[in-house]
Structure formats: structure tokens, C-alpha cells
Image (cartoon, rainbow, N blue to C red):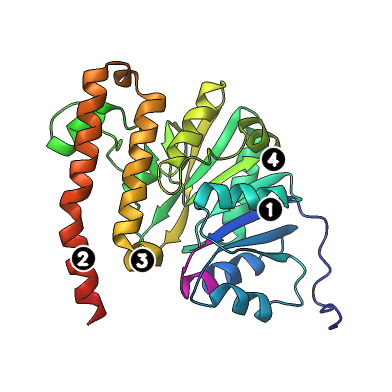
Amino acid sequence: MNSPDPRYSPAPPTLSVIVVAADSGPDLRDCVRRVLACRLPLELILVDNASRDGVPPAIARAHEHDERLKLICSHRNIGFGPAVNLGAKQAAGRSLLILNPDCLIGEDDLKRLLAVQAAHPKAGLIGAVVCDAEGRPDPASRRRDPLLHRSLNTLLGRSGETVEVGGEIPAELVECEAVSGALMLLTREMFERLGGFDEKYFLHCEDLDLCRRVRDIGYQVLLAGDVRVAHGKGSSSRHRPVFVSRHKHRGMWRWFRQHDPAARNPFVSAAVWLGIWTHFVLQIPGQWWRLKTRSK
């Protein structure tokens, strides 16, 4: 058995970074490398959701002497939220950072987020501004609950409240209804109080649900607007667009039934169900065509 690398003598972690991989590709290597380059007392828990690309075990071999990296392998894809919950059960840190495998975060970013958490005891969940390769902020970094009237305004281009807040995201700390699930910081106490992610969401909308439940118990959802993190687009979505889209629409339907007052009206609820699944079916031909075009 190899002896531990003397460069690594990790202190007990104050932060547990949880990354879920599902055929996430080479972006995952960069994500892990950036986290492990940080000198903060942290651990990185990598949950492999039955990837077939061989990247997670290769990463584990490459960092086998770094005791801060823990690899948890699931023999089937159990979904994003359940995988995070699985990783959280083995986490030792006082704070949990849920990080997408295509996000690149640095030490200064982590310090800033932890400082915000320490200074705001009513902050139940903290997010950051995720940006594309050109540094453009993703509007989904700061969102509203996707209530029916807001979703219709967004879909139809009508005036009034939309799901996205709109406008430039200020480089300061702001309170909002929801942040991007690509990066979310919570205390372990808060995560356990919420019961973690709702495991009935497989993929998509579980982040909106978590933010809503934080607010429902009287805590704030904050966005650290001065923390900008590079974020790619998941390779799982590119390789399995119909699979991902189906679960996204399932998540939309579950969120509506759980949190939107309009769901109390059975006629409205039936119309929403029909609209969600009609939208899903209409997207399939384009998704198949784009997948076929990329594979050539």
C-alpha cells in the first residue's frame, strides 16, 4: 500500500465540496484540480453516478495520495439530488458546497462564500454568479420561483413578472428567491434540517425546491454577486438530451404541484400537465437531430 504523500497533511475539514458526476467528461478533471489546489481545510466528495467514461476512477488514481478526495461509486444513475444526499452522509465539514462538475472555483471564491455564510446567520443558502466561457453571467444565477403566471409571461414574452429577474446582476450581496443549482453553499445543520434534496426529483428543479424550502422556514437565499465562477454546459445533457429533457419536465411538474397555488385548481392543473408534456414531445425531433448532427 502506498504511503501518504507528505505534501498533504489535511486538517479536519471545515468545508465539504460535493460534486456529482454522470459522464461529465474532461471538465470534471479541471473542476477537481481547482478545488484540490485550494489550501483551505476542505474535502472533496466525488459521487460517480454510474459514469461510463472512466473519468472519475481515473481522477481517483491521479489523486490517490491526497486524502481530501473521496470517491463514492453508484452502480446506477440515482439522480442528482439523491447523489448529493449520498455524498452529504459521508461529509465531515461544517459547511457543504454543492458544485457542478463543469464549474471552476478558486480559493478566493471559497473564502468569500464562507465569509458571507459566517457573517449572515439567517442565510440558509448562498449562491454565486455562474458565467460562460466568455465571462457572461447566466441569468439563471438569480431567479424567481417559476410560478405559473411568471412562466407564461416568460414563455409568451408578455409584460409583468418573469421567471428570470432580468437586468445586470450587481457585484454585491443580494437576496433573491432562487440561485443556480450549479453552486450552492449551506451549513450542514441547514442541509440536515431540510432533509437534503427531495429525492423525488431526479434531475432539474430540485435546486428551486431546495431554495423554496429554505425560505419557507424563515431563512434567506443570498447571491454573492461579486463571486463569478466559470460554468460550462453539462456533457450529460449533450449526450442524452431526451433523457435529460424528460426528467427536467418531470421536475417542472413536481415543483408546480408542490409549490404553486394555481395547482389547487384541477382544471388549471390538468392544463399545465398537458402543456408541460406537449412541450417535451415537441422538443424531441430537434434534440435527436442535433445529437445526430454532432455525432457525424
Q: Which of marks 3 and 1 is nearer the N terminus?
A: 1
169 relative position to 276: left or right: right
Q: In which quarter of the image is residue 145?
A: top left
Q: Which of marks 4 and 3 is nearer the N terminus?
A: 3
36 relative position to 2: left or right: left
State yes or no: discs 4 and 1 in contact (Cβ < 8 Å). yes
For the residues marked 3 and 1, what is the alpha-carbon distance in whole angstroms?
26 Å
State yes or no: discs 1 and 2 in contact (Cβ < 8 Å). no
55 relative position to 261: left or right: right
One can see residue 17 in this view: yes
Which circle marks residue 288 in the picture?
A: 2
For the residues marked 4 and 1, what is the alpha-carbon distance in whole angstroms?
9 Å
Q: Which amino acid does label 1 sit on?
A: Ser
Q: Name the residue under label 1.
A: 16
Percent x, y for residue 162? 25, 32
Which is more foreground, mark 4 or mark 2?
2
In which quadrant is the C terminus drawn?
A: bottom left
Q: Which amino acid does label 3 sit on?
A: Ala
Which is more foreground, mark 4 or mark 3?
4
Q: Name the residue under label 4.
A: 188
Q: Give the range drawn in magenta.
A: 21-29
